Image: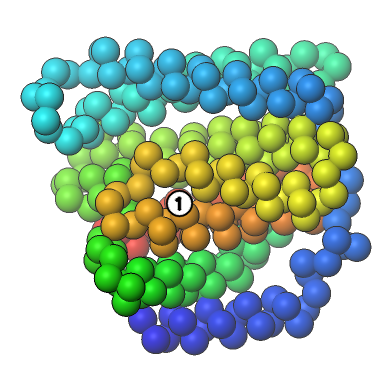
Amino acid sequence: MWGTLIIGVCAVAAIAISGVWRSSRFVAMRWKLSAGQSLLMFLVLQVVGAVGAEVGTRFAPPQSQDAPVSIDGTLWMIGTASMFQIIAVLMFLMRPDSAAHSWSRPKSALIGAVALAAAWFPLQALGIAVGSLQMALGGPAVPLEGHSTLQMLAETPLHLREWLLIGGVVIVAPALEEIMFRGALLGALRRGGFDPWSGILLCALIFALLHIPALVGGAVAPGLAILFALGVVLGWCVARTGSLAASITAHMLFNALNILQSMD
């Protein structure tokens, strides 16, 4: 724990000294939709995701009312919600007037990977610090796995359905969430007149708050802190490169590292 805290503090100091956070280094966001279209897209993706998750629960294998959601139930919810959201994304972004969003940019993806590598220990240190403060103030102990999906995977032997879920968590969910938050929501904020850092911070706050239902009891405060800081890093990736390729890469690596850590 102390090693993570020390490395995290040193990494934050190095980032602060480097000046990479300065707005003067940001570039124009490559996002073709207007503020109104972007906000509409964000809201539509939220609604169709919720509807898809509800539809998925209807097709999932039945289980007792008091039992926690099973792997099969989670697969159905994530799979159906993702399918609905992919259809909505295609409807918004694949029109001739909005097709150029610069998804495939190897240099941007590399910057996203480096950004996540630099932020990994600070994010872990932040979670440890908030969790320790929570317990020092008499709050609940922080569980080993703060996210319900990670907790489920850590407690289940890996078979085909678990690998399918891992694929969804590492590949599909980050791509859709980045289109939704750093694309549609941040695009709406920037097109609506927010300066880069105000847009990044507000987008990160909404990103963290909307993840509360997935956080395990006792992990809400540290989870929110980590997710907010992660949202800031992902927003910086887009502001620094202008491309969602950077934030998608960083988000995928973050989820993959958390899964690997939960399986130790």
Find residue 207 and report its horizontal and vertical position in percent. 56, 43
Residue drawn 67% across the image and 47% down it: 202
Percent position of residue 168, x then y: 41, 36
Figure check: 80 above or below 123: above
Residue 192 position within the rendered picture, expressed as x and y whole percent measured from the top left? 84, 34
The amino acid on which the numbered mark 1 sits, given as a three-letter code, is: Asn
- Residue at the farthest left position: 64
The quadrant in which residue 55 appears is: top left
Foreground residue among 229 and 132: 132
- Name the spot of residue 87 as percent of width and height, x first: 57, 15
Number of disc labels: 1
Q: Is residue 15 visible?
A: yes
Residue occupying the point 36% across, 42% down: 214
Q: Which residue is mark 1?
A: 255
Task: Say which of 176 and 205 sits in front.
Answer: 205
Quarter occupied by residue 197: bottom right
